[in-house]
Amino acid sequence: MGCKQYDLIDRIKDVLTIIDAAEMIGVKFRRRGGRVISVCCPFHDDKSPSFAIWPESNRWKCFGSCGSGDQIDLMARHWELPLQQTIERLASELNIQVENTAHDLRLVEQRKEEANLIGEFNRQEKELFGRLARIEHFIEDKLSEIKTVQDLDKLGDLYLLRTEVNWALDKMQKKSLEDKIEGFSIGKAVLKRWLGS
């Protein structure tokens, strides 16, 4: 019996890792250790590695702007096919039976949209984290300059701001999405106040 479309994606991902997909398109690995594997991009001429693979999360990204995604996205990019055709081709090559319905296709697109939203959130969170880290460094430098009560009067608000920045950075480093979102919200508010001052 065939599997439904949304189950099919999970079945493909169970069978095909990001490493398997990369090897299918001809990526050569010198070594495979570590959380991130960097190689030359298979989609453009690279003199130095710009293509990163995260085996634990089955994700890839080309820092030369060729794209990013999971193992299915990698195969779609390589074959130059839309997502649905890539899923069907992978299912065929991996001998996984497919049962298509319009509802299943909507779920596939919904999952893809959710992944895109999470990717955009992660990009914005990384950018905000960098800005907050720079603000934290600046505050630490300024606070180290306090020598007198007058200095403290001028820079005392930085103590409170440092606490909020540290709290936001700490939350953004947590694993749970709820903590990351809370840290992001706090960080955005801190940044807004910082830019307004």
Image (cartoon, rainbow, N blue to C red):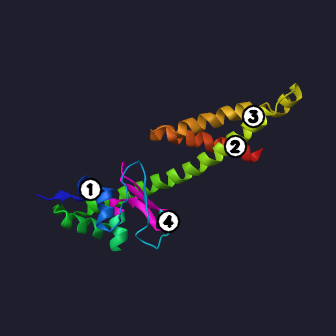
Verify whether residue 105 appears in magenta: no
Segment tinted magenta in the rendering: 51-73
The answer to which of marks 1 and 2 sits earlier in the sequence is: 1
- Residue named by callout 2: 135
Crowd rating for badge 2 (residues with CA inside 10 Å; few <14, some 14–19, many 20+)? some
The residue that disc 3 covers is 158
Q: In this figure, which residue is indicated by the disc labeled 1?
A: 6
Question: Residue at coordinates 45% horizontally, 65% vertically from top-left?
Answer: 67
Q: Nearer the viewer, mark 1 or mark 2?
A: 2
Q: How far is the residue under mark 1 from the one under mark 4?
A: 37 Å
10 Å neighbourhood of mark 4: few (<14), some, or many (≥20)? few
Which quarter shows the N terminus? bottom left
Q: Are marks 4 and 2 in contact (CB under 8 Å)?
A: no
Label 2 – label 3 distance at C-alpha: 10 Å
Of the image marks 2 and 3, the number of the one nearer the N terminus: 2
- Image quarter in which the C terminus is found: top right
Q: Amino acid at mark 2?
A: Ile
- Does dot 4 land on a helix, a strand or a loop? loop
Q: Could you say whether the residue bearing mark 2 is in a helix, strand or loop?
A: helix
Residue annotated with mark 4: 48
In this rendering, would 72 be left or right of 131? Answer: left
